[in-house]
Image (spheres, rainbow, N blue to C red):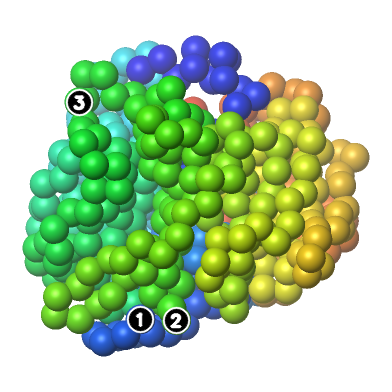
Amino acid sequence: MKLLTTLAHRWAAPLGILLGLSGPAGCGSDGAGGSGSGTVAAPYSTSGWGAIHADAKNTDSVPFDGPEDLSGAFHAVSGRIIAAAATIGPDDTVYVGVGPRLGGSTDPACYLFAIDGATGEERWCSGEVNGLAATSSPLIDADGNLYHGDDRAMVSFRADGSVRWRTPIEGFPISSQFTPDGRVLFMTQIGRLYVVDRATGALAMEPYATLPGATYDPATSSPYDCFTGKADGTCYAANTPSIDFASGRFFFTLTDPAAPPTKLVAMRYVGGTSPRVEPEWENSTLEGGSASSPDISRDGKRLYVNDAANHVLALDARTGDVIWSYDLGFSPLGSLCTAADGTIIPTGARDAAALALRDAGDHAELLWKSSEFGSRSIAVHTANGLAYIVGAPPGALFGLTLFVVDARSGVILDREPIAANDAATVGSSMSRSGLLVVPALLDGLYGFHPAIP
């Protein structure tokens, strides 16, 4: 895999897989909501980070307080490619999908790791998924079961690493979500939508082809095309869908190679004994491709998304109409963090300063811009108004530091070194205990604990 070469040539382009692989509890929590018949309580893990972007709405924020002061605790799975955030189980076990070891490897074929969140020690690893497990985050339910896929199957694991079920699929998913009635929903990179039973893996409905005729050929399809989601690639659905439980609407980005530009698409999931999905609207507004997974506001009325032409967009979730567009001046490396109070923290880029916006209704306002660092990660936002951002000096290619900042002012409260020889991370995650895990793109998983006075 030529990831280093790919990064060198594409560094200015969004790592859409990054974080939508590209991607919390809603800078506020989600609630069970409803989508018609069959609604049950959401089966998300109570740890606070059971999905790639923490929750069904992809907000990368949590409804509990976070620590102002952290200290480095461990460095695990060093030297493995990681292209999606780790998730954290109810007992602080950290789960992460990885690719091959850089430079080749004679290691056992392990691509899904369970790491002790207290010590960083390996609890188990599995070869039941292949190296394309690196493109997804394991989804965790309230019982501690995992749902993780590659380009052969969606696989459900128990917390001890044993397999519950395996369902063949076409293409590879960019992570999964739960539906309002407790099923597992995911889309593979060719735009094939699946809904499966959480207990058995049985198909709850026939796979839905958002791009009829699109097929998957592992010999010609490259996961690196998901870094941009452009029309000249082989990754048409390059990000993780978001789901609004109250309405049943779910949203995803889609690039039709026959009809660019990239679209933001809304469909509605209707549950019950014979579940189905219904198209609602499409908006072909994502210039240059998709740079993030779509985020849903806490009230379900707005969507936030990046295009690949420097913009953060706010759209009406019911109609798809654009409410406002904000020119960042750079093309983000990944998804947004969107808080319940309207604070929006974009992922940065190599030559861009970290910043935060506020949704002011009919426009976005700049809250702050850092003079010290640029963001190289999807931020984590906590209920006490803190943001955890991995950054580097603007213009620097390598050298990463974790910054704890006041999300409304940008004031730096703490900083911790991470990786001197890495260029980006792929989405941090935090549990209720204050454990923060940061997967570096090329240098494994870093863990931080609240500092003890």
Judging from the image, what secondary structure is the residue with disc 2 in? Answer: loop
Looking at the image, which residue is at 48% across and 30% down?
A: 230
- Mark 1 or mark 3: name the one nearer the start of the chain: 1
For disc 3, the marked residue is 217
Task: Sort mark 3 into few (<14), some (14-19) or many (20+) by Cα contacts within 10 Å.
Answer: few
Q: For the N terminus, which image quadrant?
A: top left
Judging from the image, what secondary structure is the residue with disc 1 in? Answer: loop
Indicate the position of residue 113 as horizontal and vertical percent values: 31, 45
Residue at mark 3 to residue at mark 2: CA–CA distance: 37 Å
Question: Label 1 is placed on what type of residue?
Answer: Ser
Q: Nearer the viewer, residue 437 or 291?
A: 291
Looking at the image, which residue is at 36% across and 51% down?
A: 175
Question: Label 2 is placed on what type of residue?
Answer: Ala
- Whether residue 233 sits left or right of residue 398 in the image: it is left
Looking at the image, which residue is at 67% across and 34% down?
A: 309
**Which label sits on residue 206?**
none
Asked if the residues shown at circle 1 and circle 2 are in contact, with their CB atoms under 8 angstroms apart, the answer is yes
Q: Nearer the viewer, residue 237 or 449?
A: 237
Residue 24 in sight here: no
For disc 1, the marked residue is 35
For disc 2, the marked residue is 246
Indicate the position of residue 58 as horizontal and vertical percent values: 51, 60
Image: 46 above or below 437 = below
Indicate the position of residue 93 as horizontal and vertical percent values: 38, 60
